Amino acid sequence: MIAEIGHYALVLAFALALAQSVLPMIGAQRGIRPWMAFARPAAFAQLAFVGLAFLMLVACFVRSDFSVAIVYEHSHSLQPLIYKIAATWGNHEGSLLLWVLILAIFGALVALFGENLPPRLKARALSVQGMIGFAFLAFMLFTSSPFERLNPAPLEGQELNPLLQDPGLAMHPPMLYLGYVGFSMTFSFAVAALIEGRVDAAWARWVRPWTLLAWTTLTAGIFLGAHWAYYELGWGGWWSWDPVENASFMPWLVGTALLHCETVVEKRDALKVWTILLSIVAFGFSLIGTFLVRSGIITSVHAFAQDPARGLFILAIFAVALGGSFTLFAWRAPQLQPGGLFAPISREGALVLNNLLLGVGAGTVLIGTLYPLALSVITGGTVSVGAPWYASTFVPLMMPMVLLMAIGPLLGWKRGDLPGALQRLAVAGLLALVAAGLVYRQETGGSVLAPLGIALGVWLFLGTLMEWIERVKLFRAAPRENWNRARHLPRAAYGMTLAHLGLAVAIVGMTASSAWKVESVQVMKPGDSITIGDFAYRFDGVAPAQGPNYIAERATFTVTRDGKPYTLLYPERRQYEVQEQPTTEAAIQSSIRGDIYAVIGDHAGPQSWTVRIYHQPLVPWIWVGGLLMALGGLTSLSDRRYRIGVPNRLPVVQATGA
Amino acid sequence: MKQRMKRKTLRLYLVIATLCLLGLAVGLTLYAFQSRIVFFFSPTEVAAHKPDVGQVVRLGGLVEAGSVQKAGDGATTNFRVTDLKNTVTVSYRGVLPDLFREGQGVVVEGSYGADGNFAASEVLAKHDEKYMPPEVAKALKESGRWQEGENGQPVSTTGNTSGTSGATGAANP
């Protein structure tokens, strides 16, 4: 029964989505108030039905109802409860339901908090949101229903892939989806604004919280994913330029650009057409990501089962959404009022450059992701595009970006004082050069990238601090005034400062861990010791261990630093009972200097094991940096101007021909 | 007094900046395509045309049954990669992936050293037992041995993982 209730709720949501996409749009066009007002209850009901379906699916997983196909394929009665729940979205169908659920949540949030939106804009945005929901519900119902039954019902399930049996699965996909799907909201607002023929500061202020929310969660999702890969896969890396990682990174790059140019629309009423275009492209990249993962054209740890029909369906959604919105864009964008002017050297100018660099960066990532696919279709050749490729394309493009990030905030709107800004950054520049010099001297035969990366991190960190110091007039006014100024700075300013500082910290961590990772592979017998740097590792032996649904070999290492006890490490090699797939559990001990990371491999002989030990300098800085960036997003989101005192729009004049 | 910025001048600056950046990106990309991508070879292709010493390539095929040996130092593994027509001997120092087995598909990345041996820097892990790397499936098809599935090799049906067996994971949309 439970599965049927869920399926029925989805069908109802599907029908409702159709109504939500048609009625408010016509209502807004013709000025029929009740039809426009229909959007609000429809969005709430949409959430209720999709939410019900999702709960029903979770219930199937929790009760281990193996007559439901995806429960049978991805769960097992011995799985711990948290992984039974997380397994709900640990598969194609269930994660699609999560996607649609989050879409419905966003729709309902706009309906709830959109009291101050002009009714037409709101009706149109919710209508576009309804169309997206309709498309994805159709996709789900016609190609990948989560509630498919099996007859006869198997007695036991096949278990979730052991790699996914990790708290990471509970956090990473929902966060990432909040980000992906969040950009659908900006997309809907952009399309609505195009239909209305009007973009102004007020519009930017309404859209910005949604972009911020999407950006913040996407940032958190990406960093969570990197962290998960780092500790779970046991190869000691946190980013491998896998097509699916890129699929989440490209919307992030475009979303970051969007976030920045929305401030220009809001503050200076300029770059409006560009902002609309970015809103469309950001969601387009989210759809590309969905296509790459669900169509089976790439194979990776993230990819779902291959099914050409699904790929075609998503491609069709992609074509209609982007084709439609670009046509609308080409038709309506010229009618948007041209915005304010600014000198090339100004805050606006810096943000334009930021946008260009991020856009071009996203473009290179796209080329690198699609090139192997295109080549294999056209010539049948097989190549792989990996980290070295991105290191010589994407990374050099981002370096001027980071350089600019410290300067931009110090430039004034409209016309900036570049010599003045550079003068204020002299200390930061000097210290960055010193850092580069020190790193270069310390390094023996390393690449030039490491000193450059560290210098950029130092530059950005100090430059960002400098901007804050300027704002609160630290050292130039009485402490009391410093305090008052610091207290009255808008939260959005603190958000920017935190996010930029976070990126600086992350850059330092990424550079250090890429440049100075030490890997040591040894065959060890119990009692053997090895020394890496200051640390000595004694292998004490391996003991069997028992988990809820796996058995493991657990090794013990006694780690000493300069002869003094430091820690104990317990890496494991697990054998899950149902899926006969061994997995390695790395043992990691973090400190501010970096991680020590131990993995135990297979038997190399009687009573000896292959052991891999990494020193990963400054890796925790990456996670701290990511956390700061996400906190920056949240801080900015809490800015009072998004909550109260929403500006009144100029009287709405309907564009003719709408 | 500076003149007030004209809309046209502003547009000109924008166009120039965009073109410069695009040019830079295209240049970097073309350069990277020449030197920074890794080509895939099957053992038969290697036999026909051996990659240069030091050129990083990917090699795919099956791990030949009975070929896996530990070298004297214990941490180096030697094995042969085969497409059932030609073989290449590979040595790898490190921890092998969890699913490295004789008779199963494998992709290794590495290069030929001056001594003529193929040294792998990375043995790529598969995430699912039933899954065959597409490159390997292709190499086997091209060597003409695809459908035979001889010696009980799990070769014949695995190119197109369908239904449940290919559903390896779910961490992204």
Image (spheres, rainbow, N blue to C red):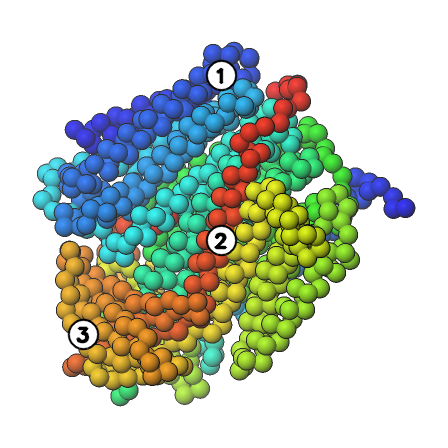
Nearest to viewer (mark 2 / mark 1): 2
Most extreme residue toward the right, as rendered? B1
Can I make out residue B142 in this image? no
Q: Residues within 10 Å of mark 1 (few under 14, many from 20)?
A: many
Which residue is tagged 1? A36
Q: Position of A236 compared to A284: left or right?
A: left
Nearest to viewer (mark 3 / mark 2): 2
Q: Which kind of residue does numbered mark 2 sit on?
A: Leu
Q: Is residue A450 above or below residue A47?
A: below
Q: From mark 1 to mark 3, how far is it between C-alphas?
A: 68 Å
Q: Is residue A291 above or below residue A586?
A: above
- Judging from the image, mark 3 belongs to the subunit labelled A
| Total count of labels | 3
Q: Are marks 2 and 1 on the same chain?
A: yes
Q: Position of B113 compared to A396: left or right?
A: left
Q: Which kind of residue does numbered mark 1 sit on?
A: Met
**Label at residue A542:** 3
- Judging from the image, mark 1 belongs to the subunit labelled A
Q: From mark 3 to mark 2, how far is it between C-alphas?
A: 39 Å
Q: Secondary structure at mark 3?
A: strand
Q: Which kind of residue does numbered mark 3 sit on?
A: Val
Which residue is tagged 2? A628
Q: Could you tell me which quadrant the C terminus of chain A lies in? A: top right
Q: Is residue A73 above or below residue A548?
A: above
Q: Are marks 3 and 2 on the same chain?
A: yes
Q: Is residue A640 above or below residue A367?
A: above
Q: Position of A428 compared to A71: left or right?
A: right
